[in-house]
Image: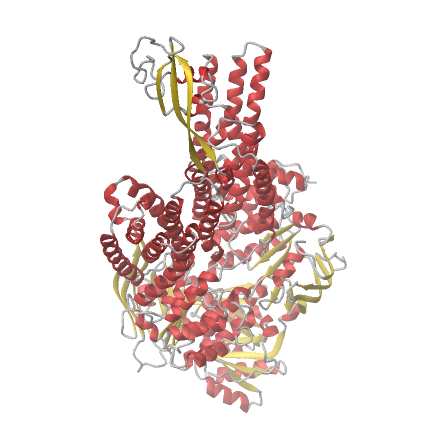
C-alpha cells in the first residue's frame, strides 16, 4: 500500500474542441492507476475522442496527457508501440488464419520477425485459441473473433490495454469467458487495462476502479468497492405471504417498503436481523432471499436518487 | 536443506517481451514486404496466385520469342518499347486483381484502425501499399525487357552492337517504370474508393478499358482522316515487251497490278509506299525511255487532327506511350506522334503520379480509428 | 400503385451520398467528347451519328442506368436498410414502381438529356438525329432501369450481374449473334433513333415497331418479376 | 448434466391475462437454409406483455423474429401474428412494428424525416403528430433534426425504435434493441418497453444481456440450437429443474454451527464453508426455505444474509444451455 505507483494515464485539464464547434472533452482531469479500470459514459460523452487522444492520433485543443509516462502529443508512436487497442467494431479479415494475422500485427507493433511469431503464438494461447490458430478467421464464432481481437491487442506486449466494448455481441457464456480473460490479464499478466463498456454489471464484476465521464467532464473516479457500498436496507424475499410479513414487521416497529417482489427493511442495528428471522419463523414462510442492498454503479446515471427506495409501479 | 531435484514445474504463464522494438522505418518496410508478397499471392490461398503468375508467364512469352529471334539473328518479335502497350491488357489485369487485394480487404473488414493504433503514421500505410504495388508491377513489366536485352547481348558480336542494344532498350525501361507508376497509383486510388473487392476489380478494369476505347476512337475513327495522293513517276518495266502496262506487266505483284512497293519507293521520290501501301497504280510505256514506264500511283496518308493527337490523353497507358513517342521521336506506334501536344502528355503523366498519390494519402487521412 | 414516400426516400438516398457524382460522369465524358470533336478539324464527316448512337445510346445510357438502377434498391438490400421500407404495410408493387420510376427519371436526366444536349452541340441545332437519339435513349432509360431494379431485387451482387449483362450481352453477343438483336435494349433504342432520323450510320438492326413492342413487353415482364422477387424478400442468414 | 428435458418443460407461463387470446403463435415451426436447420419444431404462444427471447449466438433468435415479420417463410409449420400468416403479407405491419438488429438506417435522413416517412408509409391520418409523439417517446426531440449518420449507435437505435413505434403497433418485435445504448439510454428504453407492455402491447425482444431481460421481461423464451428449451417465468423454470440442487449463499453469526445444523436436514444435499460464507446445496427448495429461519432461531444463530446464488436468469440460462 505504501508504494506510490506512477499513474498509467494522467490527463490534466484536457479539452478537445472539434473544428465544427463540438466540444468532446472539456477540462477533463483523469488519473488511471494500474489494475483494471472501467470507463463508462453516455454515448457522445467523449469516450472515443479520449481513446484517440490517448493513442496520440489527435492533438487536444489544450491540456496534457501522459500515457505510461510518455507524452501523448510528442511521443504518439512510442505510446502506440506500448498500448494494445481492441476496437469495438469488427476489424478482422475473413480469409487469413489467426496466427498469420496476429503475427503480422505483431510486426506492425514493432516486433522483429521471430519475436512476432513467438508472441503471436503466446497471445493466441493465452486467449484460448491455441488449437484453432491455423483456421481462417472467417470460420470463427463471434466469441472466437473477440478473442482474436484481444490477441492482436496483446501481441505487442503492451503496458496498457484499451478495450472498447470487449463483450459486444457475445452471448452470456461468451461474455463470462471474455470477462474472466480480462480479469486474468489485469491481475496475472500485470497489464493495466482500461475497459470501456456500457454494461455496468460487467464493470462491477471485473474492475478495480471506475472512471465515469459525462459531457466531456469527469463525473466520478473511484474504486469499485467504494461505489458498491452497502446501504442500510435489507431486502427480504419470501415465496409466499409477503403481505402478512410486511404487516408483522411494521407491527414490530420496523420501517418496511415494497420494491418489486422484495420487502425492504431499514437496517437500524443488529437486532433487526433477529426480528426478521423470528417473524419469518413464526409465520412459517419460505425465505428465499435476505440481502443487503448495495449501491450500484448504475445509480450514477439514474435521474432519481435511489437513496430512499420508492414504491415500485408494479 | 533442500536437495536439487529433477522434477520441476516450468512457468508457462504470461511472459512479457523484453527484446528490442523496431522503429517506424523497419515497420514500414515490414508492411511493404507484406504488400509485395500479397501482390504475387504469397501468404494467401492458391486462388490468389492464379492471376499474378498467369500474367508473369504471359509477359515472358514474347521475351522468349525475342531471345529465339536474337539467336537466329532475326529482328525482334516484339520490340522493347512496344511491350508496354502491347501487353497492356495483362498489366491492367494484374493491377485490377492486386490493388484490391492490397487495400480493399482492409477497408472491407475495417482492419485499418488496427494499423493506425500502432506506431505507423497515417501516410505510412498508403506509402507502403503504393510502393509494394509499384514494385510488383515493375518487376512484371521489366522482366520481358530484361530477358530480351540479355538475349540480344548474348548474341551480339561486338561491343558496338551491345551499345546499340542498350540504347534500344532504354525506351523500354522508360515505359516500364512510368507505366508501372501510373497503373499502380490509379489502381490503388480506385481500389481504395470502395470496400468491395469485386467492385474494385470491376472499377479498375472498366476504367482502363473504357478509357482505352475512347483513346482508340479519338485516335482512329474520329481523329484521323485519310488524304489521297496521286503521283506520277518513272520506274523500270520488268517486262519491256508487254503490250499493255496497266495489266500485271511488271511481273511481280505489289499494290494493285503494279510494281512491288520497294521498286516504287526506290524510283519515285516522295511516295512513301512502304509505310502506307499503294491503293492503285496505272501506267503506260515511257515513249522516251525504252524499258521504263510512266506510272501514276494512288495512295492515302493519314492526317492527324488535334483530336487524334490528344486521343492518347484519355487513357493512362497511352499517356505513357504518347510520351515515349514524343520523347524518343518514335514512329513504331499505334498512336500518332503527339507533337506539339507532347508537353501535355508529360504534364498528365506527372499529374497522375503526383496527384494520384496525394489523393491516396488524403483518402487515408480520413479513416477513423474508433 | 405508387408511393410518393418511397419515391422521396429513394431520391434522397440517391443524392445523399458522394456516389451521386458518379452518375454524371458518363454524361460528362459524352459532352466533353462532343465538344472536343466539334472544335477539332479533320474529323470524319458522320461523327455525330457514331457519338450519339454508339457512345450515347450504346454506352452512356446503360452505364448511367446501371449505376442508378442498382443504387435505388441494390445498395439498400445490401446493407439491410430496405427492411425499414418493407416493415410497413406498403404493397411491394408500389415499392418496385416507386424505385423504378425514380431510377428512370434520374437516368433520363443524367443520360437521355445529355444525349440531346450532345446532339445539339454536334449538329449546331436541333435536328432529327439528336431528337431520334434522345427518344431512343429515353426508351433505353426506361427499360434499363426496369432491368437493373429487377436484377437488384433478384440477386445478391446486382452490380456484377448488371455489368456482365452490359458487357457480355449488349456489347459482345448482340454484335456477334444476329438473332440477339431482338433481345438487346441498345438495339431497341437505336431502332427508335433510326426511325426518327433515318440515319444509317446508327447501325440500327431493328425497325421501330418491333423495338417498341419488345420494349413494352420487357418492361411489363421485368416489373412483374421484380415485384414477385421483392414480395418473397428474405433476410439472409448471417 | 440433464437438468430437465427441454420438451418436458410445460409452457408454464405465469400468464397474467389468461383470458386474452395469443397474439403471436408458432405451431410446430421449422425453418432451414439449405441443410442448416435454424429453427427446429418450435411451438409457442405470446400474449400481451414483455417477453424476452434468449439463446446463445446462432440459436435462432433472429430467425424467429424474421419469421414473425414475414422476412422468412417457415419451411414447415405455421406462424401467425394476430391470426394472419406474415409471409408475403405486408399488411400485417398495420399492427406490427419491427426494430431490426443490423445497424442500418437511412443515414442521410434526419430522425424526424425518418420517423415521419415511416408514419406516412403506414398511412397514418396525421403523420406529423404521430412522428412527434414517437420521437417524444424515445426522447429524441432535441436531436431530431440532425442527420442520422451523425448519431451514436444508441441514438440510431432509438430512431429505429421511434420509426417502429410510430403507428402504435399492437405487436412490437425488437432484435437486440439495447445494443450500443449507454446506461441511461438503456434504462429509459427499458422503462418505455415495460410501460408499453403494461398497456397491453405484445412485445418480443431478443437480448444477450440477461440482467436486462431479468429486469424487463415478464416471461422468457429460451432457444437453444434451434429448439425451444424453456418458456415462462425464469424463477418458475428454475423450480422445475428438480434434478438440480438449489445453491444458496448464507452468512450468519456462526457459519460452522449453521453448517452442522443444516447438514442434519434431509432437504440439504451438501454444505461448504467458503471465504464468502456458507454455500448450501438444497435438493428440496420448498422444505429448505421454509425451515431455514426456524432452524436458525432454534439454534440461536443470527442469520445475516441468504442469497439464492443460482436463481438468477443467468444461471437458469446456463443450465438450459449446458443441459
Query: The N terminus of chain C appears in which quarter of the rendering?
Result: bottom left
**Residue B343: x percent and y percent?**
59, 37
Return the residue found at the far bottom.
A251
Q: Nearer the viewer, residue D177 or A269?
A: D177
Q: Nearer the viewer, residue C79 or A131?
A: C79
Q: Nearer the viewer, residue A72 or A125?
A: A72
How many numbered discs?
A: 0
Report the side of D81 relative to D57 (left or right): left
Query: The C terminus of chain C appears in which quarter of the rendering?
Result: bottom left
**Residue B315: x percent and y percent?**
49, 40
Q: Quadrant of residue B348?
A: top right
Q: Residue at x 25, y 58 (%)?
A: C216
Q: Tell me if residue B173 comes above or below residue A19 in the rendering.
A: above
Q: Tell me if residue B24 comes above or below residue C139 in the rendering.
A: above
**Residue A88: x percent and y percent?**
54, 57
Q: Nearer the viewer, residue C71 or B4?
A: C71
Q: Is residue B23 visible?
A: yes
**Residue D30: x percent and y percent?**
28, 61
| Display coloring | secondary structure
Return the residue found at the far front.
B288
Q: Tell me if residue C66 comes above or below residue B332 in the rendering.
A: below
Q: Is residue D269 visible?
A: no
Amino acid at each position: 500500500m505504501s508504494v506510490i505507483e506512477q499513474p498509467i494515464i494522467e490527463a490534466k485539464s484536457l479539452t478537445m474542441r472539434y473544428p465544427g464547434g463540438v466540444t468532446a472533452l472539456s477540462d477533463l482531469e483523469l488519473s488511471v492507476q494500474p489494475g483494471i479500470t472501467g470507463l463508462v459514459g453516455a454515448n457522445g460523452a467523449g469516450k472515443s475522442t479520449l481513446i484517440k487522444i490517448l493513442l496520440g492520433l489527435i492533438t487536444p485543443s489544450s491540456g496534457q496527457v501522459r500515457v505510461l509516462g510518455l507524452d501523448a502529443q510528442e511521443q504518439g508512436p512510442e505510446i502506440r508501440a506500448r498500448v494494445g487497442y481492441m476496437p469495438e467494431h469488427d476489424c478482422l479479415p475473413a480469409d487469413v488464419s489467426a496466427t498469420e494475422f496476429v503475427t503480422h500485427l505483431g510486426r506492425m507493433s514493432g516486433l522483429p520477425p521471430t519475436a512476432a511469431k513467438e508472441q503471436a503464438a503466446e497471445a493466441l494461447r493465452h486467449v484460448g485459441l491455441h488449437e484453432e490458430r491455423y483456421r481462417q478467421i472467417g470460420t470463427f464464432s463471434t466469441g472466437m473473433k473477440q478473442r482474436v481481437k484481444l490477441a492482436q491487442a496483446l501481441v505487442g506486449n503492451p503496458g496498457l490495454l484499451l478495450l472498447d466494448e470487449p463483450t459486444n455481441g457475445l452471448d452470456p457464456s461468451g461474455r463470462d469467458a471474455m470477462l474472466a480473460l480480462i480479469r486474468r490479464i489485469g491481475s496475472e499478466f500485470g497489464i493495466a487495462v482500461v475497459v470501456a463498456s456500457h454494461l455496468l454489471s460487467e464493470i462491477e464484476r471485473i474492475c478495480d476502479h471506475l472512471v465515469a465521464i459525462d459531457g466531456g467532464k469527469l463525473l466520478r473516479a473511484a474504486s469499485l468497492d467504494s461505489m458498491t457500498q452497502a446501504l442500510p436496507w435489507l431486502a427480504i424475499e419470501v415465496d409466499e405471504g409477503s403481505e402478512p410479513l410486511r404487516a408483522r414487521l411494521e407491527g414490530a416497529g420496523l420501517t418496511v417498503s415494497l420494491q418489486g417482489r422484495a420487502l425492504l427493511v431499514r437496517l437500524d442495528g443488529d437486532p433487526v436481523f433477529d426480528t426478521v428471522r423470528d417473524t419469518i419463523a413464526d409465520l412459517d414462510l419460505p425465505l428465499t432471499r435476505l440481502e443487503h442492498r448495495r449501491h450500484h454503479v448504475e445509480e450514477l446515471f439514474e435521474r432519481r436518487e435511489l437513496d430512499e427506495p420508492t414504491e415500485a409501479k408494479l | 536443506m533442500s536437495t536439487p531435484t529433477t522434477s520441476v514445474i516450468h512457468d508457462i504463464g504470461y511472459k512479457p517481451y523484453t527484446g528490442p522494438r523496431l522503429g517506424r522505418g523497419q515497420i514500414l518496410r515490414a508492411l511493404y514486404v507484406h504488400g509485395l508478397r500479397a501482390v504475387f499471392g504469397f501468404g494467401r490461398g492458391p486462388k490468389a496466385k492464379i492471376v499474378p503468375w498467369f500474367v508473369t508467364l504471359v509477359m515472358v512469352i514474347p521475351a522468349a520469342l525475342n531471345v529465339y529471334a536474337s539467336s537466329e539473328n532475326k529482328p525482334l518479335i516484339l520490340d522493347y518499347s512496344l511491350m508496354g502497350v502491347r501487353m497492356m491488357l495483362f498489366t491492367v489485369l494484374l493491377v485490377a486483381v492486386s490493388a484490391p487485394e492490397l487495400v480493399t480487404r482492409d477497408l472491407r473488414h475495417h482492419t485499418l484502425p488496427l494499423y493506425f493504433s500502432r506506431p505507423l503514421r497515417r501516410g505510412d500505410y498508403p506509402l507502403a501499399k503504393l510502393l509494394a504495388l509499384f514494385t510488383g508491377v515493375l518487376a512484371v513489366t521489366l522482366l520481358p525487357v530484361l530477358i530480351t536485352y540479355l538475349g540480344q547481348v548474348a548474341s551480339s558480336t561486338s561491343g558496338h552492337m551491345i551499345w546499340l542494344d542498350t540504347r534500344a532498350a532504354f525506351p523500354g525501361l522508360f515505359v516500364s517504370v512510368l507505366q508501372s507508376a501510373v497503373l499502380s497509383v490509379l489502381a490503388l486510388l480506385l481500389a481504395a474508393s470502395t470496400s468491395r473487392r469485386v467492385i474494385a476489380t470491376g472499377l479498375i478494369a472498366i476504367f482502363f478499358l473504357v478509357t482505352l476505347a475512347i483513346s482508340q476512337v479519338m485516335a482512329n475513327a474520329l481523329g484521323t482522316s485519310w488524304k489521297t495522293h496521286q503521283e506520277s513517276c518513272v520506274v523500270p518495266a520488268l517486262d519491256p515487251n508487254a503490250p499493255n502496262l496497266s495489266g500485271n506487266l511488271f511481273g511481280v505483284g505489289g499494290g494493285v497490278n503494279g510494281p512491288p512497293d520497294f521498286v516504287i519507293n526506290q524510283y519515285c521520290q516522295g511516295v512513301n509506299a512502304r509505310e502506307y501501301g499503294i491503293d492503285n497504280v496505272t501506267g503506260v510505256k515511257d515513249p522516251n525511255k525504252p524499258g521504263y514506264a510512266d506510272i501514276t500511283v494512288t495512295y492515302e496518308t493519314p492526317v492527324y487532327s488535334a483530336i487524334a493527337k490528344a486521343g492518347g490523353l484519355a487513357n493512362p497507358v497511352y499517356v505513357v506511350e504518347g510520351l515515349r513517342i514524343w520523347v524518343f521521336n518514335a514512329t513504331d506506334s499505334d498512336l500518332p506522334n503527339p507533337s506539339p501536344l507532347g508537353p501535355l502528355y508529360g504534364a498528365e503523366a506527372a499529374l497522375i503520379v503526383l496527384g494520384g498519390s496525394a489523393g491516396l494519402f488524403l483518402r487515408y487521412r480520413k479513416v477513423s480509428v474508433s | 400503385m405508387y408511393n410518393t414516400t418511397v419515391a422521396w426516400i429513394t431520391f434522397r438516398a440517391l443524392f445523399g451520398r458522394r456516389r451521386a457524382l458518379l452518375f454524371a460522369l458518363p454524361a460528362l465524358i459524352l459532352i466533353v467528347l462532343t465538344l472536343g470533336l466539334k472544335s477539332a478539324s479533320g474529323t470524319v464527316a458522320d461523327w455525330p451519328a457514331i457519338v450519339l448512337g454508339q457512345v450515347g445510346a450504346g454506352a452512356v445510357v446503360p452505364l448511367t442506368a446501371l449505376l442508378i438502377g442498382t443504387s435505388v434498391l441494390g445498395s439498400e438490400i445490401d446493407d439491410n436498410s430496405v427492411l425499414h421500407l418493407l416493415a410497413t404495410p406498403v404493397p411491394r408493387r408500389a415499392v418496385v414502381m416507386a424505385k423504378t420510376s425514380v431510377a428512370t427519371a434520374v437516368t433520363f436526366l443524367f443520360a437521355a438529356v445529355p444525349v440531346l444536349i450532345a446532339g445539339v452541340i454536334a449538329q449546331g441545332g436541333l435536328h432529327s438525329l439528336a431528337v431520334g437519339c434522345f427518344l431512343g435513349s429515353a426508351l433505353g432509360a426506361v427499360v434499363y432501369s426496369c432491368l437493373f431494379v429487377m436484377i437488384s431485387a433478384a440477386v445478391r451482387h446486382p452490380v456484377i450481374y448488371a455489368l456482365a449483362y452490359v458487357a457480355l450481352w449488349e456489347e459482345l453477343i448482340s454484335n456477334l449473334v444476329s438473332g440477339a438483336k431482338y433481345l438487346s435494349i441498345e438495339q431497341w433504342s437505336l431502332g427508335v433513333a433510326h426511325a426518327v432520323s433515318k440515319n444509317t450510320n446508327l447501325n440500327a438492326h431493328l425497325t421501330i415497331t418491333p423495338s417498341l413492342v419488345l420494349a413494352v413487353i420487357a418492361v411489363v415482364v421485368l416489373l412483374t418479376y421484380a415485384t414477385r422477387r421483392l414480395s418473397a424478400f428474405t433476410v439472409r442468414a448471417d | 448434466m440433464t437438468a430437465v428435458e427441454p420438451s418436458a418443460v410445460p409452457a408454464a407461463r405465469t400468464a397474467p391475462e389468461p383470458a386474452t387470446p395469443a397474439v403471436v403463435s408458432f405451431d410446430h415451426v421449422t425453418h432451414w437454409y439449405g441443410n442448416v436447420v435454424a429453427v427446429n419444431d418450435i411451438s409457442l404462444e405470446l400474449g400481451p406483455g414483455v417477453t424476452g427471447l434468449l439463446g446463445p449466438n446462432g440459436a435462432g433468435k433472429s430467425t424467429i423474429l424474421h419469421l414473425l415479420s414475414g422476412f422468412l417463410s417457415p419451411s414447415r409449420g405455421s406462424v401467425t401474428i394476430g391470426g394472419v400468416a406474415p409471409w408475403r403479407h405486408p399488411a400485417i405491419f398495420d399492427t406490427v412494428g419491427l426494430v431490426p438488429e443490423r445497424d442500418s438506417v437511412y443515414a442521410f435522413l434526419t430522425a424526424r424525416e425518418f420517423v415521419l416517412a415511416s408514419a406516412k408509409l403506414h398511412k397514418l391520418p396525421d403523420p406529423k403528430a404521430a412522428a412527434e409523439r414517437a420521437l417524444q417517446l424515445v426522447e429524441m426531440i432535441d436531436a431530431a433534426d440532425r442527420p442520422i449518420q451523425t448519431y451514436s449507435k444508441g441514438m440510431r437505435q432509438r430512431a429505429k425504435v421511434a420509426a417502429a413505434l410510430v403507428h402504435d403497433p399492437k405487436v412490437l418485435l425488437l432484435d437486440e434493441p439495447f445494443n450500443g445504448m449507454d446506461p441511461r439510454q438503456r434504462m429509459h428504453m427499458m422503462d418505455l418497453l415495460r410501460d408499453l407492455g403494461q398497456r397491453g402491447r405484445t412485445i418480443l425482444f431478443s437480448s444477450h444481456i440477461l440482467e436486462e431481460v431479468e429486469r424487463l421481461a415478464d416471461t422468457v423464451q429460451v432457444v437453444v440450437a434451434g429448439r425451444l428449451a424453456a418458456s415462462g417465468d425464469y424463477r418458475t423454470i428454475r423450480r422445475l429443474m428438480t434434478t438440480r440442487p438449489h445453491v444458496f449463499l448464507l452468512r450468519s453469526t456462526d457459519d460452522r454451527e449453521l453448517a452442522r445444523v443444516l447438514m442434519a436436514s434431509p432437504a440439504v444435499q451438501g454444505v461448504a464453508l467458503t471465504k464468502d460464507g456458507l454455500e448450501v446445496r438444497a435438493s428440496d427448495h420448498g422444505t429448505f426455505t421454509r425451515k431455514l429461519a426456524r432452524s436458525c432461531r432454534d439454534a440461536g444463530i443470527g442469520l445475516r444474509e441468504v442469497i439464492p446464488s443460482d436463481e438468477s436468469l443467468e444461471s437458469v440460462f446456463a443450465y438450459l444451455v449446458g443441459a
